[in-house]
């Protein structure tokens, strides 16, 4: 599987890796770069460069293009793309009601060097955006917390995080859409169906 470095000419490097016969994995260094790259891919869909793509799948540091007729050709074309920084339009805000009653709230407060009430204030006052979805249907990886509030996963994952658990891990916040194992820090619960 050949790998090709793609220069975006906008401050980040995109690496292209063909996957099987009909897919291309574009890898970057951050979720913000993924956002910019995904926007550029969507802008070019239906053009001579990307006439047909079955799926565009963003993740933490990649965008997968599946259903390409010639992934190597797409990688070569993408090498010439200028990918501007992401612009955030006015999307529809979705508010998820939360009770900050999670078993790890005190631990997160300790990691942040604040009180549990301050965790609630900081977290509830943050505007999040969905970087990508995965892990389970309905699980959105939300970003928005400043890096000083990123927390590690638990040393020992739980065998079961309940449905509606509001959780933190690394740069992400998410709400578990159904019960499942998980190593994220649980700081609250929600009755919202996600």
Image (cartoon, rainbow, N blue to C red):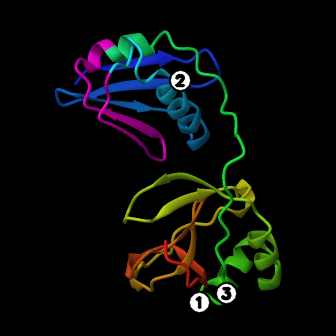
Q: Nearer the viewer, residue 142 or 104?
A: 142
Mark seen at residue 190? none
Circle 1 residues within 10 Å: few <14, some 14–19, many ≥20: few
Q: Position of residue 105 (x, y in %)?
A: 66, 84
> Residue at left 47%, top 21%?
44
| Picture quadrant where residue 148 is located | bottom right
| Picture quadrant where residue 172 is located | bottom right
Judged left or right of residue 26, residue 32 is right
**Relative height, residue 181 to residue 75 (above, below):** below
- How far, Cα to Cα, is label 2 from label 3? 40 Å
Earlier-in-chain disc, 2 versus 1: 2
> Residue at left 37%, top 24%?
16
Task: Tell whether position 126 is magenta.
Answer: no
The N terminus lies in quadrant: top left
> Residue at left 59%, top 89%?
103
Q: Identify residue for label 2.
A: 13
Q: Nearer the viewer, residue 36 or 91?
A: 91
Q: Which residues are magenta?
A: 52-73
Q: Identify residue for label 3.
A: 99
Circle 2 residues within 10 Å: few <14, some 14–19, many ≥20: some
- How far, Cα to Cα, is label 1 from label 3? 12 Å
Q: Identify residue for label 1.
A: 103
Instruction: Assign a secondary structure to mark 3.
Output: loop
Instruction: Assign a secondary structure to mark 2.
Output: strand
| Picture quadrant where residue 17 is located | top left
């Amino acid at each position: 599987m050949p790998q090709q470095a793609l220069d975006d000419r906008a401050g980040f490097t995109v690496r292209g890796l063909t996957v099987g016969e009909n897919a291309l994995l574009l890898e970057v260094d951050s979720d913000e770069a993924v956002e910019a790259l995904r926007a550029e891919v969507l802008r070019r869909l239906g053009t001579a460069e990307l006439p047909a793509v079955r799926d565009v799948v963003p993740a933490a540091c990649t965008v997968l293009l599946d259903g390409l007729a010639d992934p190597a050709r797409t990688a070569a074309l993408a090498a010439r793309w200028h990918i501007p920084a992401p612009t955030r339009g006015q999307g529809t805000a979705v508010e998820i009601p939360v009770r900050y009653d999670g078993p790890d709230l005190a631990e997160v407060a300790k990691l942040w060097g604040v009180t549990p009430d301050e965790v609630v204030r900081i977290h509830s006052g943050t505007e999040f955006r969905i970087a990508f979805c995965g892990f389970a249907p309905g699980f959105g990886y939300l970003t928005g917390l400043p890096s000083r509030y990123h927390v590690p996963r638990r040393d020992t994952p739980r065998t079961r995080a309940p449905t509606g658990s509001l959780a933190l891990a690394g740069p992400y916040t998410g709400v578990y859409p159904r019960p499942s194992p998980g190593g994220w820090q649980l700081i609250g619960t929600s009755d919202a169906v996600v």
